[in-house]
Amino acid sequence: MAEIRPLHAVHYAPDVDLDAVVAPPYDVIDADQRAALLERSPHNVVEIDLPQGDDPYEQAATTFRQWQADGVLVHDDEPALWILTQDYTTPDGERKTRSGFFAAVKVEDYGPGRIRPHERTHPGQKEDRLRLQRATQANLSPIFSLYSGTAAWDALKPATEQEPFGTTVDADGTTNRLWRVGDPSTIERVQNALKDAELLIADGHHRYETARVYAQEAGTEAAGYVLMCLVSLEDPGLTVFPTHRLVKGRGQERYEALSHVLKEQFAIKQITEDELSPKPIEGPPVFGYLGSHFKQPFELTYLGEPPLPGPLGQLDAAALEHVLLKGVLGLSDDDISHHNGFDYARDRRQAVDRVTSGEFDVAFLLRPTPVSQVQEIAASGESMPPKSTYFFPKVPTGMIFNPLT
């Protein structure tokens, strides 16, 4: 069962402009974006969550302490839960609001009725996050997790009728609003609503596995809890986008073999560029496909039996990885984890541009993964390939921090 408790949070002082200091999660920020964020403010959270320098982790720790000493960051004396609502626009132009809350969640081993992952992780990213957590002794960015039921949000929702503690609008146009909820009776209602809940990690697997290692190392009560943003699976604003796959440099022989397998195992339909992102409908695995040679978009529908047993066999990302990426094109787990001749694209435009420019040879575009499918695969004990889901919007980093001392 999930054990949650309110936070003695560290957060930016009320007079700090949140627009200037919050940032996307560290793993979607490149060097140019990091520089642009720091141009907004020298106190932007990337200075501690994505540190640089000869010893970046010690630099992050020193900066984190200095900001608290200078009053840029303040420490809450009283425990609280923190509501986060996110107003955003989908690619179809629909306005939605996703509602959740920040809490400290007890770190447990994965398992039924407790906390479940849904994707495989890369070891390099875990080591980076562990070294940062050791140095700063804090959770700087939250894990995004899902739970079933609406009672927790029903208890918190009345607080959103008050003025928010803070508001910020990110680069995607998402309006993030934050409320502090310190009322003990409300906190108790939320805890009771989730006492039997199973949590599904939607985003932040590396951070959670880092938290497990750190909790064992530190052995303290505070280190045994991790910062999470919790959202109900029934929330009407919960949206999942796909993450597309890009491949290059596999050699003429493998690309000829790919062409043969596509003709043999897939129904191939010529489509327009606007149709490259397959519709989110039930059925066998379907991919959009674009090659740099002919630059003609196709829709590929898998014709064979499910390539993997159980619910993974119905997952586009797993079928693509098993049959084409690893099978025909010969990519290894190491190639995928280290982006060796392989990369991801967040949207159709990015995938098309990186292929038509010649940067990559092939793009495979996937359908969004339904949340029900994520639940089914997690419950089976299996793990999806990395980046099988892209929950939108991302939870910003810098709204609040969870000290571990």
Image (tube, rainbow, N blue to C red):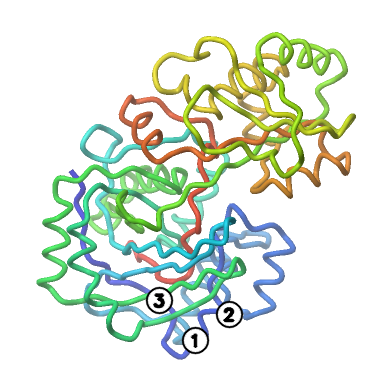
- Is residue 189 placed above or below 345 in the rendered structure? below
Gap between marks 2 and 1, in whole Å?
A: 8 Å
Q: Amino acid at mark 2?
A: Ala
Question: Circles 3 and 2: CB distance less than 8 Å?
Answer: no
Question: What crowding class fits label 3: few (fewer than 14 Cα within 10 Å), some (14-19), or many (20 or more)?
Answer: some
Residue at figure coordinates x 57%, y 61% from the top left: 93
Residue 32 visible to the viewer: yes
Relative horizontal placement of residue 241, taking residue 326 as reference (left or right): left
The answer to which of marks 1 and 3 sits earlier in the sequence is 3
Q: CA distance from mark 1 to mark 3?
A: 10 Å
> Which residue is rendered at x = 57% and y = 70% of the image?
173
What amino acid is found at the position of numbered circle 1 in the picture?
Val
Element marked by disc 1:
loop
Q: Position of residue 259 (x, y in %)?
A: 79, 16
Q: In the rendering, at what x and y percent does residue 168 appear?
A: 50, 77
- Which residue is found at the position 17% from the left and 67% from the top? 155
Residue 138, position as x, y percentages in the image: 40, 62
Query: For numbered disc 3, what is the local secondary structure?
Result: strand
**Distance between mark 3 and mark 2 Cα atoms:** 14 Å
**Residue type beneath disc 3:** His
Q: Look at the numbered discs 2 and 1 and tell me whether their residues touch, using CB distance below 8 Å.
A: yes
Circle on res. 380? none
Looking at the rendered image, the disc whose residue lies closer to the viewer, 3 or 2, is: 2
Residue 363 point in image, percent of width and height: 74, 34
